[in-house]
Image (cartoon, rainbow, N blue to C red):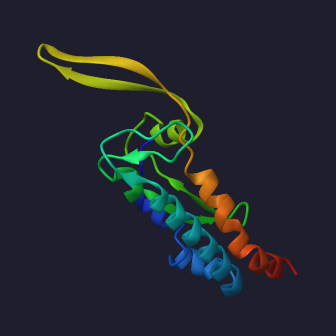
Amino acid sequence: MAFDLARVRQTFFDSAAVMKKVPPAERKILSKAGAFVRQRAKTSIRKRKAPSAPGQPPSSHTNVLKKYIFFGYDPTARSVVVGPTVAGSATGAPRSLEEGGTATLRERLRGGTATRTVRIRPRPFMGPAFAVELDKVKGDLRNLIK
């Protein structure tokens, strides 16, 4: 599936569709939770040349991963969804970083290009960000359910 930023923008909390469908109190709490988790995940990713150790948040060499972390409203579950988009790539790199997996790399060589598959050990950044920030909004979420 191709990345479509226009479609992602429709789920942003300041979009007309979300503002029309979601009550203001619910929108405020879910937006706050999404913003906290997003910011925590972005700040956990350090820009450096060396790769991070497995089990630690990933290193960013170009800041692309940080740039494409969004949060939006999921009307089906009446919740907020936070995470990186694939940004036009079919490799599934953000999921491979979070959970571990494989990725196919294309390398330029003198005579053309070559591909190779590499194993990626987990470098979670969204799960830990969610766990830390959940405590900040737990009370607000309880008040929303009443």
Q: Residue at x 52, y 59 (%)?
A: 41
Which residue lies most toward the bottom here?
A: 24
Residue 103 in the image, given as x and y percentages of width and height: 44, 27
Above or below: residue 14 compared with residue 98: below
Residue 92 in the image, given as x and y percentages of width and height: 48, 37
Q: Quadrant of residue 135?
A: bottom right
Q: Residue at x 51, y 79 (%)?
A: 14
Q: Residue at x 60, y 75 (%)?
A: 31
Q: Quadrant of residue 74?
A: bottom right
Residue nearest the observer in this picture, 144 or 76: 144
Above or below: residue 117 compared with residue 32: above
In the displayed structure image, the side of residue 19 where residue 59 appears, left or right: left
Q: Quadrant of the C terminus?
A: bottom right
Residue nearest the observer in this picture, 53 or 107: 53
Residue 56 in the image, given as x and y percentages of width and height: 53, 44
Residue 122 in the image, given as x and y percentages of width and height: 56, 36
